[in-house]
Image (cartoon, helix red, strand yellow):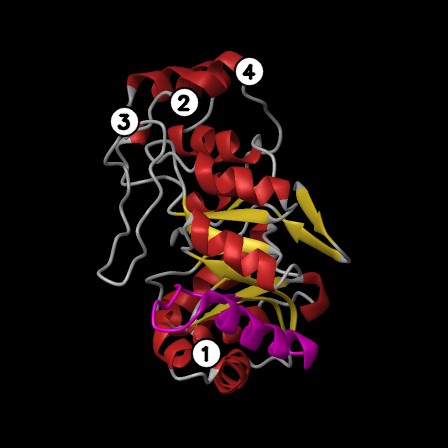
Amino acid sequence: MEYFKSGDLTIPRLGFGTWQLKDDDAVEAVKIALDTGYRHVDTAAIYENEEAVGKGLKDGGVARDEIFLTTKIWNEDIEKQRIADAADESLSRLGTDYVDLLLLHWPMTDRPVSEQVLELAEVKKAGKARAIGISNYNVSQLTEAISACPELACLQAEYHPELDQDPVLNVIRNSNMLFTAYSPLGRGDSLDKQVVKDIAEAHGRAPGQVLLRWLMQQPNVAAIPKATSREHIEQNFDIFDFDLSDDEMKKIFSLVEPDGRIIDPDWAPQWDTGVAA
């Protein structure tokens, strides 16, 4: 495993994502992930699986203080200025007294960004989150958030070879924050690219392992791939005993597309334009 240091936190750079996992499937997937060696688990209130994730963590047999647990506050609670109450509800569902990282899931445009992150900071001050961060912010919002609340530790956002995230990555790195990539394998198109298949064959790996390794070799970047089967959960984890060359990294970077973004709901901010657009 590789780690990112943020203050007194040590964050595993490969985590287990749980979006779309529900009920017993979520419980079993989390248990398999822990058995495989994952110690970073990501969920959110809107996923409606916090209880199942909490049960998986409890049944997984790993001490709570060995797990880095992330959850997210949903939009309605941010709008209604009830971040602290929503955090308490998440903790209750997860069956824990604290999370290691608490994120605002999306920026809400009807409230100043500074207001939103300062309200979030109160949850950390109360000891219910070891670290705080944001998700799906553009550069302008991210810059405003950091200015108002320099203790922000993380931005979570979509990132894979088809999507250029250099604008926000530059801000993240200059602020010594962590960028956690969701949907790290994209829509699957990159897995079928011949250049990725060739690199995978050269290393005796699966294409998905190559794309996750590409993320791990970028500074200040973590990834939270989701998988349901033991085979894929273990395969995604098995990426720390090989390295991509500079040339291989460049070839994967070249897969960026102008329309590479997958997650773009109606409430999304105005996204930054990357070099490929």
Q: Is residue 129 above or below residue 141?
A: below
Per the image, label 4 sits on a secondary structure element best described as loop
Specify the label residue 245 is tagged with. Answer: 4
- Magenta stretch? 103-128
Figure quadrant of the N terminus: top right
Q: Which of the marked residues, 4 or 2, is nearer the chain's N terminus?
A: 4
Q: Amino acid at mark 3?
A: Asp
Residue 253: x percent and y percent?
41, 24
Packing grade of label 3 (10 A; few <14, some 14-19, many >=20) is few
Q: Is residue 140 left or right of residue 66?
A: left
Q: Amino acid at mark 2?
A: Ile
Q: Disc 4 versus disc 2: distance between alpha carbons? A: 11 Å
Q: Disc 1 versus disc 3: distance between alpha carbons? A: 36 Å
Specify the label residue 192 is tagged with. Answer: 3
Q: Disc 2 versus disc 3: distance between alpha carbons? A: 12 Å
Q: Which of the marked residues, 2 or 3, is nearer the chain's N terminus?
A: 3
The front one of 194 and 32 is 194
Residue marked by disc 1: 51
Residue 64: x percent and y percent?
68, 70
Specify the label residue 252 is tagged with. Answer: 2
Q: Which of the marked residues, 1 or 3, is nearer the chain's N terminus?
A: 1
Q: Which numbered mark, 3 or 4, is in the foreground of this view?
A: 4
Q: CB of mark 3 within 8 Å of CB of mark 4? A: no
